[in-house]
Image: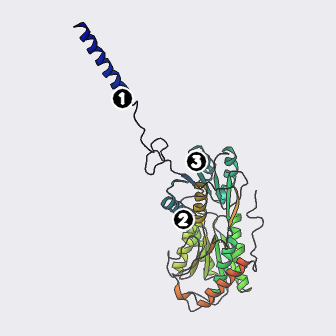
Amino acid sequence: MKKNFKLLALCLSLVMLLGLIAGCGGGQEPAKDSKEGTKEGTKDAKKFKVAYVISNNLGDKSFFDSGYAGLERAKAELGIEYKVIQSPNSADWEPNLKAAAEEDYDLIIAAASQMHDAVKNVAPQFPDKKFVYIDDVVEGNNVASITFAQNEGSFLAGALAALMTTHTELPGMNKEKIIGWVGGADIAVLHDFLIGYEQGAKYVDPETKVLSSFAGSFSDPAKGKELTLAQYSQGADIVMNVASATGVGILEAAKDAGKYAIGVDSDQDGIYPGHILSSMLKRVDNACFDQIKLAMENKWKSGHFEYGLKNKGVGLTEMTVMGDKIPQEVRNKLKDIEAKISSGEIVVKHYENFGVKK
């Protein structure tokens, strides 16, 4: 009887031991793809993260919105996550950039040229982070500086304005060879726009007079409208907008005065149909998308990279909104000028040392 009891106790002990081992997972095969979290759709899969730190707010329908469009494209096509950090107060530029660098972003995009000192100060503090600086140049092993040949794009815009300014068959167009230009803040990159615009206009007709004004801000539509109406009153019938959110007022002035404007950075042709001859595209969207893709493919490099007419970084819209109101001979002339700039036959001036490492 004792022997049977001892045998029963031994069996029960063995059963309990085996149950304990099974309960601890011993002998269980790991689930496939769970260890590294690389299987598509698993919760552990790490998405590529981008911070877009801008020196103003979105909603300008121009420069910053163009960069945002590049992020949206990267989200749709590459599956990234991103955060937009808006910084209309200059005192926040450096702290916001530093805060982004301290988080787990794979790429930090800083826009625009006013953030030069912020990028120059913050990037060296985070040598393992990748920074993309849009619209100016900062030297650094972890900084890719992206500039645009806006002088080339503006040359085309100035040529268009000079070609169209005496086409009196268009309502609101006078015979005077006077065109206008209104910029936001008085900074180097905008002078680079202006020098190209003036050169393009004079290339078409040396007698063309170019009026120019700076609003002193990128976020004052009322001032943009005031300056544009003043130029119309001085004989201009076409004014180029280079003013981000201030430019909303410039375009509105064209509509209210029954005159014409040229948009900037993004395609603004349809904002006031029939009053925007064309827009000078500055492909911030392409630059942001390209830099994200390169970083994701481990092909990203630091250095200075320029987007110009040759690589479709700048240019005019197709002017489809205006349609046949832009004569074919004008379109042909612009294509000829574009080809000559791309080939080097026409050399467009830069403003002083714009785009040089600082």
Q: Quadrant of residue 339?
A: bottom right
Along the viewing direction, whichever of 5 and 133 lies nearer the viewer? 5
Along the viewing direction, whichever of 29 and 167 lies nearer the viewer? 29
Q: Going from the N terminus, do you reach mark 1 or mark 3 first?
A: 1
Image location of residue 148, percent across then percent down? 67, 67
Name the element at disc 1: helix
Q: Going from the N terminus, do you reach mark 2 or mark 1 first?
A: 1
Name the element at disc 2: loop
Image location of residue 27, percent across then percent down? 40, 32
- Residue in the image at 57% along x and 77% along y: 317
Mark in the foreground, 1 or 3: 1
* Disc 2 from disc 1: Cα separation: 62 Å
* Residue contact at pointers 2 and 3, CB within 8 angstroms: no
Residue type (three-letter) at the residue carrying disc 1: Ala
On the image, numbered disc 2 is attached to which residue? 60
On the image, numbered disc 3 is attached to which residue? 100
Name the element at disc 3: helix
Along the viewing direction, whichever of 299 and 230 lies nearer the viewer? 299
Image location of residue 71, percent across then percent down? 53, 60
On the image, numbered disc 1 is attached to which residue? 22
Mark in the foreground, 2 or 1: 1
- Residue in the image at 45% along x and 51% along y: 40
Q: Is residue 258 left or right of residue 98?
A: left
Task: Name the residue furthest top.
Answer: 2
Does residue 186 appear anywhere in the picture?
no
Residue type (three-letter) at the residue carrying disc 3: Ala
* Disc 1 from disc 3: Cα separation: 46 Å
**Position above or below: 179 against 291:** below
Along the viewing direction, whichever of 219 and 17 lies nearer the viewer? 17
Quadrant into which the N terminus falls: top left
